[in-house]
Image (tube, rainbow, N blue to C red):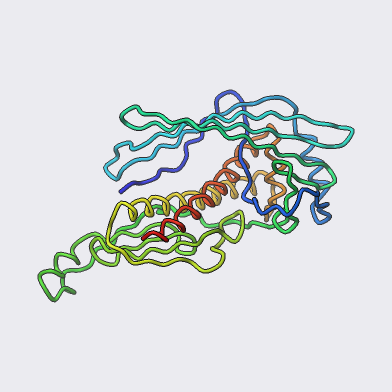
């Protein structure tokens, strides 16, 4: 079994940002004027946005339960910001290069480019498509930070056993992991699992699952192992969102956070930009892992 460790963010020379937002449910290519957005606050963030190119790097290390490294994911994020003060428009180009390295030295590299733009009238675009008003104005509140997000172990007492076979089963460690309202697994007896997955979250903050989840019962297999790993990724993403949200709420001095605020902060050179990137990236990662786990259950 694998254990995913929280991302270690390493600042190199500059602050920067990357990511494709949670909302790929953008409605159309026509901008939505978000009248409910605090345009005064948006204007302030715009003024803090500086044109130029910044770079930073992140390292995610995936380890087995015995502490051995299973994979190292190094990401290099290049952020290029341009401004048109006449139009009050900021454009952010994010280029993310990831290298996945196995213990045997085998590497795989991926590249992703995202274009984000907004103006002081409250119009926001991702890759040329306007972000839906409902998504843009969604709020996130402080969330509990879980210190045991990846996996827990339960020991059944031997006195509950009525047969020798049950004694073997009940003395075993029974694992569970993930997030029960998103993607989750629980070992009900030795090497037999209850698996549950929602296809997508209700919002960018992963506050819950949308629609009807898939549920399966299965003995352990390579597919179950893959599902457990994805459940831990979802749990890690949700926790990263909680940590980044707490940081942003503290630095901004506000009680709630809007998605539009996170997007706009990506273009700044402030410390809040790092938290905005972390939140943004975790939203994307969690959503992708949820969908992959949901479809994986279809084959179990």
Coordinates of residue 185 in the picture (x, y in percent): 37, 61
Between 37 and 148, the one lying in front of the other is: 37
Q: Count of labels shown? A: 0
Residue 179 spot, x, y in % from top left: 45, 59
- Looking at the image, residue 281 sits to the left or right of residue 99; the answer is right
Residue 151, horizontal then vertical, whole percent: 36, 54
Q: Is residue 63 above or below residue 152?
A: above
Q: Which residue lies furthest to the front in this view?
A: 299
Q: Where is the C terminus found, in terms of image quarters? A: bottom left
Residue found 39% across the figure and 59% down from its top = 299
In the rendered image, the residue lying farthest to the left is: 164
Residue occupying the point 77% across, 48% down: 29
Q: Where is residue 290 in the image (x, y as percent from the top left)?
A: 49, 55
Residue positioned most to the right: 86
With 240 as the anchor, is 176 left or right in this view?
A: left
Residue at 34% of width from left, 57% of height from top? 152
The image quarter in which residue 180 lies: bottom left
| Depth check, front residue: 279 or 244 | 279
Image-quadrant location for residue 155:
bottom left
Pick whichever, 104 or 153, lies toward us: 104
Indicate whether 194 appears above or below 36: below
């Amino acid at each position: 079994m694998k254990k995913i460790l929280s991302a270690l963010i390493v600042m190199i020379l500059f602050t920067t940002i990357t990511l494709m937002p949670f909302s790929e449910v953008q409605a159309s290519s026509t901008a939505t004027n978000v009248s409910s957005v605090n345009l005064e606050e948006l204007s302030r963030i715009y003024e803090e946005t500086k044109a130029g190119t910044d770079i930073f790097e992140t390292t995610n290390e995936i380890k087995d339960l015995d502490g051995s490294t299973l994979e190292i994911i190094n990401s290099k994020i290049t952020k290029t910001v341009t401004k048109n003060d006449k139009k009050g428009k900021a454009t952010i180009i994010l280029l993310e290069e990831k290298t996945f390295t196995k213990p045997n030295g085998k590497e795989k590299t991926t590249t992703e480019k995202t274009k984000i733009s907004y103006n002081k009238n409250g119009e926001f675009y991702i890759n040329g498509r306007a972000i839906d008003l409902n998504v843009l104005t969604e709020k996130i509140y402080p969330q509990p930070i879980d210190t045991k997000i990846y996996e827990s172990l339960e020991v059944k007492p031997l006195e509950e056993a009525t047969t020798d076979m049950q004694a073997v089963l009940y003395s075993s460690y029974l694992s569970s992991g993930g997030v029960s309202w998103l993607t989750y697994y629980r070992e009900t007896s030795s090497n037999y699992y209850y698996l549950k997955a929602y296809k997508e979250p209700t919002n960018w903050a992963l506050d819950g699952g949308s629609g009807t989840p898939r549920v399966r019962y299965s003995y352990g297999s390579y597919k179950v192992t893959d599902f457990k790993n994805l459940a831990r990724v979802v749990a890690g993403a949700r926790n990263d969102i909680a940590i980044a949200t707490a940081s942003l709420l503290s630095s901004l001095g506000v009680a709630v956070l809007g998605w539009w605020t996170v997007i706009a902060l990506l273009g700044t050179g402030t410390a809040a930009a790092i938290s905005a990137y972390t939140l943004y990236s975790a939203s994307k990662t969690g959503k992708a892992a949820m969908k992959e786990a949901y479809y994986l259950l279809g084959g179990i």
